[in-house]
Image (tube, grey):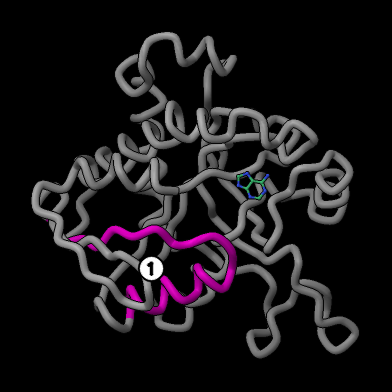
Amino acid sequence: MHEELATVLGLMPDEQKSVVAGREFWLGHLHGHEVVAVLSGIGKVAAATTATVLIEHFGVRRILFTGVAGGLGADVRVGDVIVASQFMQHDLDVSPLFPRYEVPGYGIAVFDADPGLTAALGRAVQATLADLPHVLLPGVVETFGLHAPRSHHGLLISGDRFVATTSECRVLQQALPKALAVEMEGAPFAQVCRDYGIPFAAVRTVSDRADDAAHVDFLAFLRQVASRYSWRIIDNFFRLSQIR
Ligand code: ADE
């Protein structure tokens, strides 16, 4: 989201805009590393295009994704952070030709995150959550009722729907009990990165519980919590990791 990108651009001293496929890509440096920062766009098709341009046009060698998601796991609360180890599309169904959720041509439904990149991202998330008073502005913990935010590692599911009803949330929880959270872009990024052999990792701040209250205060949460998390997680990732 724009709010998250703005905080990340704040970490880049020299960003230059380049427009490709109607998207604004920001080229520059972050802790001395050459980076390209971009909004993925919302939904699976926009995400796949953005991933493809990053790889084909800009020649990126790895991709990190930050964003927000709706919590599904029983102990996943608003303000927690999901470090994805796996991705799948919850709305893909080519049955009876292929098993439900399987991506035709791949023989699998679940795509893995890159283990090394994901471990480094996990360390960055830990460091961020351990330092919340310096990440969030005063009063924000109380405003959003955040209770000792923690991280979860596991399955993230993607689909072309903003899940905002308790009934749809229950259907997803029953169909895919291992899913920690739902969003709209992770699985297509993982699939494109697999096609090109590019390491991919993703982190998502839980902005809502994907239920009837899912739309409440979404923008305020993005500005005051999620974009602050993204900014500090990215900063910690580059500060703590040995990525070359
Ligand atoms: N991103 C953040 N919350 C979401 C939700 N409830 N459904 C889909 N994507 C989301």
x, y percentage for residue 31?
Answer: 13, 47
Which image quarter is the C terminus in? bottom left
> In the figure, is residue 158 to the left or right of 142?
right
> In the figure, is residue 45 to the left or right of 239?
right
Residue 123 seen anywhere in this rendered image of the structure: no
Picture quarter containing residue 228?
Answer: top left
Q: Residue at x 22, y 69 (%)?
A: 18
Callout 1 secondary element: loop
Give the amino acid type for the residue marked by disc 1 in the picture. Answer: Pro
Report the span colored magenta: 33-55
Q: Residue at x 89, y 43 (%)?
A: 167
Q: Residue at x 33, y 73 (%)?
A: 54
Front residue of 54/86: it is 54
> In the figure, is residue 196 to the left or right of 155?
left
x, y percentage for residue 50?
Answer: 42, 71
Total numbered labels: 1
Counting other residues with Cα less than 10 Å from the Cα at mark 1, is it few (<14), some (14-19), or many (20 or more)?
some
Q: Residue at x 80, y 35 (%)?
A: 212
Furthest-front residue in view? 22
Measured along the vertical axis of the image, is residue 192 above or below residue 199?
A: below
Mark 1 lies on residue: 199
Measured along the vertical axis of the image, is residue 190 above or below residue 201?
A: below
